[in-house]
Amino acid sequence: MYDESRVYPLLTAGVDEVGRGPLAGPVVAAAVILDPHKPISGLADSKKLSEKKREALYPLIKENALYYAVAEASVEEIDRINILQASLLAMQRAIEGLGVIPEHVLVDGNKAPAVNMPVDTVVKGDSRVASISAASIIAKVDRDRMMREYHDRYPQFSFHKHKAYGSRQHLDELLEHGPTPVHRKTFAPVRKLLDEDGE
């Protein structure tokens, strides 16, 4: 169990994922081991920061962290194993991509990936633990940039605005244009359209 008063080992990785809720695109996870000698001010839950602030913190985290890694689970994997398992898989890949074996892992939320080191889940960890905040920012910025690339590829969808979440705008675009190859076929609004089309 996570203990805020405990001093965790130097190589403690904070882990978070972004993109469980959207109707399209991969789920992206990041793992970050911060350097206690290079504190980064302004770290917070990425959802509570403006896009400008996240973009400003992004290079600071990469420059000052001891280690960081980003990984994803694809749309195909999400559809095959479900979004929870895909999120855990992306987090596992991020941890394994660090280039060092963490002494401890702190994961945002209440579910932990299968890893061979001590791990604690931290509810609202992206607001409570600096390294998890850093991981949430890295994952969020990377995924948002991916969504802007999706908009370039599929300009009929405003991925750069709604980031593939199920907003009214996105649902209207789905109805008008139908799903793209990057949409998650097992998510209800997409599945409903595919069922109606007889696929």
Image: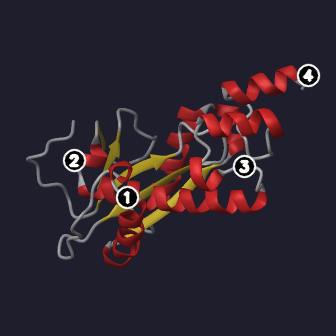
**Residue 198: mark in rendering:** 4
The tally of labels here is 4
Q: Earlier in the sequence, mark 2 or mark 3?
A: 2
Picture coordinates of residue 182, whole percent (x, y): 74, 47
**Residue 157: mark in rendering:** 3
Residue shown at 61%/56% (left/top)?
Answer: 160
Which type of secondary structure does the marked residue at label 1 adopt?
A: loop
Label 4 – label 3 distance at C-alpha: 23 Å
Residue type at mark 2: give it.
Arg
Q: Nearer the viewer, mark 4 or mark 3?
A: 3
Residue at which label 1 appears: 50
Label 2 – label 3 distance at C-alpha: 35 Å
View extreme (left): residue: 5
Q: Is residue 147 above or below residue 191?
A: below
Residue type at mark 3: give it.
Phe
Q: Nearer the viewer, mark 2 or mark 4?
A: 4
Picture coordinates of residue 13, whole percent (x, y): 33, 57
Task: Answer yes or no: is residue 178 visible.
Answer: no
Residue type at mark 1: give it.
Ser
Residue type at mark 4: give it.
Gly
Viewer-nearest residue: 87 or 127: 127
**Residue 172: mark in rendering:** none
Mark 2: few, some, or many residues within 10 Å (few <14, many ≥20)?
some
Viewer-nearest residue: 158 or 70: 158
Q: Is residue 189 above or below residue 52?
A: above
Q: Earlier in the sequence, mark 4 or mark 1?
A: 1
